[in-house]
Image (cartoon, grey):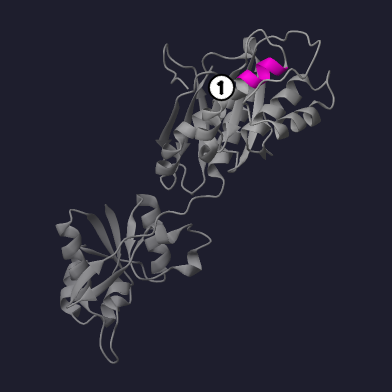
């Protein structure tokens, strides 16, 4: 771990009245960091050499460049924050740096707090980085736009419908046969209210033409995934029978990062419109703040994209850190042609 030591903050820690800032506070931090095998740099205000309790020893450390002094007239806090940002380092300091919060985002995720016990420093842990609101949806938006720019159609609805197996079946039937059978939803509502859900198939629609086979992508929040999968077979049988299809539609349940819990959307396609494999894999370049979070959600990103472009198999989603992307929430999307056998099955 790389650490920037805020020397002045440590030296002045819990300073008693009429006492001087302590060099030993700084040296205690150095000792602990060295034992932990950490890289560190010590940054001090230009004024500290005039106030420190052991001026002679402090001057030796300055001359040996063991301690780096901020140039006179330079704001030491800004200097420290800049170094930490450039080196992706932590800051050993109890200063909250509030006046710089607009310029340097999420400072507390970099700051290592500390206290002293019997003249020995105890170094705490930094806070977990704040997650930029909706970063997963922003990434999916950019990826889907990239597919659209390559002339692929994508499913864009994100409002969602109240989740239940009944509503999935109803909405599928309404969308698949709406133009020819107005009022079908009311009929379904009535029959489902009288019978146990999916327990019995009732012949409701007469004289329907046989339709081509469908694939229904059921887009759900991850919390509703298991229930949707559990009921997929019954939903398929119900739809196939109601619409007199030669073959029941395939139900493909996909985690979708746009869906909040207890909501779903449907992307319904003819089977000949389905891409067996994703035409492109997705490379996501992110800043260090978001790298682990995006990696953790990469499978759900792949599922979201597959369900909305109509791909049976998931694209491979790779996440790579990029030092040029400095701020939380920054990312770049690249689509790459897959190698043979390079996709992950969904």
State the extent of the magenta-drawn residues as a range: 237-242
Residue under numbered circle 1: 233
Mark 1, other Cα within 10 Å: few <14 / some 14–19 / many ≥20:
some
Give the camera-side residue of 245 and 143.
245
Residue 78 located within the stretch drawn in magenta: no
Q: Identify the residue at the far bottom of this view.
A: 18
> Residue at left 18%, top 70%?
28
Is 102 situated left or right of 185 in this image?
Answer: left
> Residue at left 33%, top 77%?
47
Q: Where is residue 210 in the image (x, y as percent from the top left)?
A: 73, 8
Residue 331 vertical placement versus 36 (above, below): above
Residue 32 vertical placement versus 332 (above, below): below
Residue 100 vertical placement versus 214 (above, below): below
Q: Position of residue 48 (x, y in %)?
A: 29, 76
Residue 304 vertical placement versus 241 (above, below): below
The image quarter in which residue 162 lies: top right
Is 113 situated left or right of 181 in this image?
Answer: left
Can the viewer see residue 154 in this picture?
no
The image quarter in which residue 32 lies: bottom left
Give the camera-side residue of 305 and 269.
269
Q: What element carries label 1?
A: helix
> Residue at left 72%, top 15%?
243
How many callouts does the rendering have?
Answer: 1
Q: Position of residue 121 (x, y in %)?
A: 21, 70
Can the viewer see residue 113 in this picture?
yes
The image quarter in which residue 239 lies: top right
Is 40 situated left or right of 248 in this image?
Answer: left
Is 94 situated left or right of 152 in this image?
Answer: left
Q: Where is residue 207 in the image (x, y as percent from the top left)?
A: 81, 10
> Residue at left 28%, top 53%?
2
Magenta stretch, overall SS:
helix
Residue 240 located within the stretch drawn in magenta: yes
């Amino acid at each position: 771990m790389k650490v920037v030591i805020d020397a002045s903050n440590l030296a002045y820690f819990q300073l008693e009245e009429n006492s001087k800032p302590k060099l030993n506070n700084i040296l205690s931090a150095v000792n602990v960091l060295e034992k932990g095998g950490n890289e560190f740099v010590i940054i001090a205000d230009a004024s500290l050499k005039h106030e420190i309790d052991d001026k002679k020893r402090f001057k030796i450390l300055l001359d040996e460049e063991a301690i780096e002094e901020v140039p006179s007239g330079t704001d030491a806090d800004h200097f420290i924050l800049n170094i930490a940002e450039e080196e992706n380092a932590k800051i050993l300091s109890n200063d909250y740096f509030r006046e710089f919060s607009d310029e340097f985002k999420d400072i507390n995720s970099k700051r290592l707090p500390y206290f002293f016990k019997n003249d020995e420093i105890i170094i705490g842990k930094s806070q977990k980085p704040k997650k930029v609101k909706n970063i997963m949806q922003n990434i999916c938006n950019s990826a889907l736009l990239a597919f659209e720019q390559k002339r692929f159609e994508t499913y864009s609805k994100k409002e969602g419908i109240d989740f239940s197996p009944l509503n999935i079946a109803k909405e599928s039937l309404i969308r698949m046969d709406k133009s020819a059978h107005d009022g079908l939803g009311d009929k379904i509502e009535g029959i489902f209210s009288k019978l146990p859900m999916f327990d019995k198939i009732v012949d409701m629609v007469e004289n329907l033409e046989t339709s081509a086979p469908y694939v229904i992508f059921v887009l759900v929040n991850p919390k509703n995934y298991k229930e949707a999968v559990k009921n997929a077979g019954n939903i398929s049988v119900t739809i196939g029978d109601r619409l007199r299809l030669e073959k029941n539609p395939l139900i493909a349940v996909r985690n979708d990062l746009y869906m909040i819990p207890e909501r779903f959307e449907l992307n319904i396609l003819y089977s000949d419109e389905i891409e067996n494999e994703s035409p492109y894999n997705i490379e996501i370049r992110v800043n260090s703040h978001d790298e682990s979070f995006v990696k953790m959600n990469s499978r759900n990103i792949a599922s979201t994209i597959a369900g909305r472009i109509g791909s049976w198999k998931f694209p491979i989603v790779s996440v790579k850190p990029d030092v040029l992307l400095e701020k939380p929430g920054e990312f770049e999307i690249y689509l790459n042609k897959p190698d043979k056998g390079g996709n992950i099955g969904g």
